[in-house]
Image: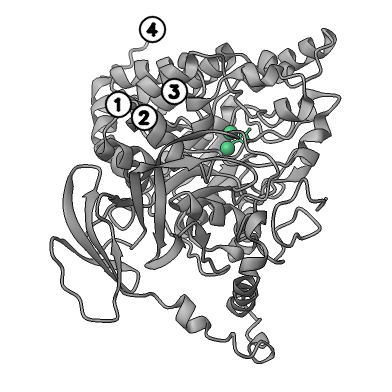
Amino acid sequence: MCSDHICNSLICSNTWSSRPSLYLIQPLGSKMAHLRSLILLLSISLLSLPGLSQFCESVNGYCDSENILASSKILIKGGTVVNADHQEVADVYVEDGVIVAVRPNIKVPDGVRVLDATGRLVMPGGIDPHTHLAMEFMGTETIDNFFSGQAAALAGGTTMHIDFVIPVNGSLSKGYEAYVEKAKLSCMDYGFHMAITKWDDIVPKEMETMVQKGINSFKFFMAYKGSLMISDELLLEGLKKCKSLGALAMVHAENGDAVFEGQKRMIQLGITGPEGHALSRPPVLEAEATARAIRLAAFVNAPLYVVHVMSSDAMEEIARAQKSGQNVIGEPVVSGLVLDDSVLWNPDFITAAKFVMSPPIRAAGHGKALQAALSTGILKLVGTDHCTFNSKQKSLGIDDFRKIPNGVNGIEERMHLVWDTMVESGQISATDYVRVTSTECAKLFNIYPRKGAIRVGSDADIIIFNPNSTFHISAHSHHSRSDTNVYEGRSGKGKVEVTISGGRIVWENEELNVVPGSGNYVSMPPFNYLYHGIDKADQNYLASLKAPVNRIKQSL
Ligand code: URP
Ligand code: ZN
Ligand code: ZN
């Protein structure tokens, strides 16, 4: 599994599990030069994991973990500070992980680390609303765990993500416990969504517990028949429960029964390769499920969040609902915005299989339509659906596309690709860029302005971005543990030069300085802005019924 061609971490673990091992910090090219820092990081990682402080004495000389873990004082000087609503030239001063001043000409005493941001943009770190780290799925587990995935994120300017907890045999609490374990490797802030995969008397009570634990969103899979898929009846129950809790209901919108039929049809036609994946689940099935979920949400008057909108057909259903006044949030993902399905017809199986995700990457034209919808505000924020499998894992479906683990990378590439695709092309402004990559996510999941803003009192999750530099993407230099990258060979304008996470510089000069166990869980309260006014609308609805009609009972 760890042969050189499929594992580019310095020292591999020999399973795909998320057990602590040694960690990917640098691409292969800089192995030796950074061996010492790796040893230091290993020492610190051992120290920072619960129950491992006894290692301190045995790694004498590397026990200055406090220094590394302590927040430093940083002054970011002379940059253009960009928020979702405004941009201005200002300095940003950070102390103990928090932004304490944003204004021109801040003076600081000696000993403060000063970063010159002249000619650069100083923006809130990205927040990725949609990831799957260490997820057990389709007979295997995603190759990026909470350390490698987050390290990759930080190298690309994302400082927080929200991952989907998958219940264990339908149990939310067991799923939650499993993800708490997985997330112990974290090196940046993260939150959780929770998937709902069955319904009984216990699940709604567990949903209440999850909200108390800081989960304010629940995902319903309308596809993956036989594993994660739920029925319309369950979706209705879930929508009602989410509404009563002030939680956001999210849907993976594809008609799973029809997909199942489409898959059988492809196999009967002898189409067993990755192109069969796209052909078996066309846009009409995404549009149908999107429309159905939207109508069921309207029926109970609950807000709805549609994840990974991949087709213009689904996007148009969202636009229609919004026009009628319904609160529906549409999330495109980077793959849907910038790729097209021609790659699935590549004659090389692995080259094609790496692009298999659901809903599928669509024909040319859909991406452009999604970009336009993002620029006009129909689609609100960009995720990645980072769900990475390496070539060996993708090969599970060599004879049958239905067995190819679904998912692509993106957590490291999102910030660069959205800038290049949307800002460099003139479709959105820098302030809009901050909104779609960070602020809107913080608002929707109710953690704004702690996250998503360069503002006094906000967490010091900051990027310094050079709009005149260039990014290059390759599996040889990325920080994911995967041996492939769906954006291989792409380059473009704009580069994240520095990432500050929780007040620490974690990415600078193309080097990561990350510590497993240093990331924090971010508890997210319910009743986000979409809930404002819902009770009034419900009261108006009840008043409009003019029912029950008071009839005088007469004997016939
Ligand atoms: O292909 C995908 N999208 N894999 C991750 C699971 C999901 O549906 O989000
Ligand atoms: Zn999904
Ligand atoms: Zn997903």
**Amino acid type at mark 3:** Ile
**Mark 3, residue position:** 294
Few, some or many residues within 10 Å of mark 4 (<14, 14–19, 20+): few
Going by the image, does 414 lie left or right of 449?
right
* Dot 2 and dot 4 residues touching (CB under 8 Å): no
Image position, residue 513 (x, y; %): 51, 66
Mark 2–mark 4 Cα distance, whole angstroms, equals 72 Å
* Dot 1 and dot 4 residues touching (CB under 8 Å): no
Q: Please, what secondary structure does the residue beneath circle 2 have?
A: helix
- The disc placed on residue 556 is 4
**Amino acid type at mark 1:** Gly
Mark 4–mark 3 Cα distance, whole angstroms, equals 46 Å
Viewer-proximal residue, 296 or 115? 115
| Mark 2 or 4, nearer chain start | 2
Is 352 placed above or below 364 here?
Answer: below
**Amino acid type at mark 2:** Met
Few, some or many residues within 10 Å of mark 3 (<14, 14–19, 20+): many
| Mark 4 or 3, nearer chain start | 3
**Mark 1, residue position:** 426
* Ligand 2 located in image quadrant: top right
Mark 3–mark 2 Cα distance, whole angstroms, equals 27 Å
**Amino acid type at mark 4:** Leu
Mark 1–mark 4 Cα distance, whole angstroms, equals 75 Å
Image position, residue 59 (x, y; %): 66, 87
Q: Is mark 1 within 8 Å of ligand 1?
A: no
- The disc placed on residue 422 is 2
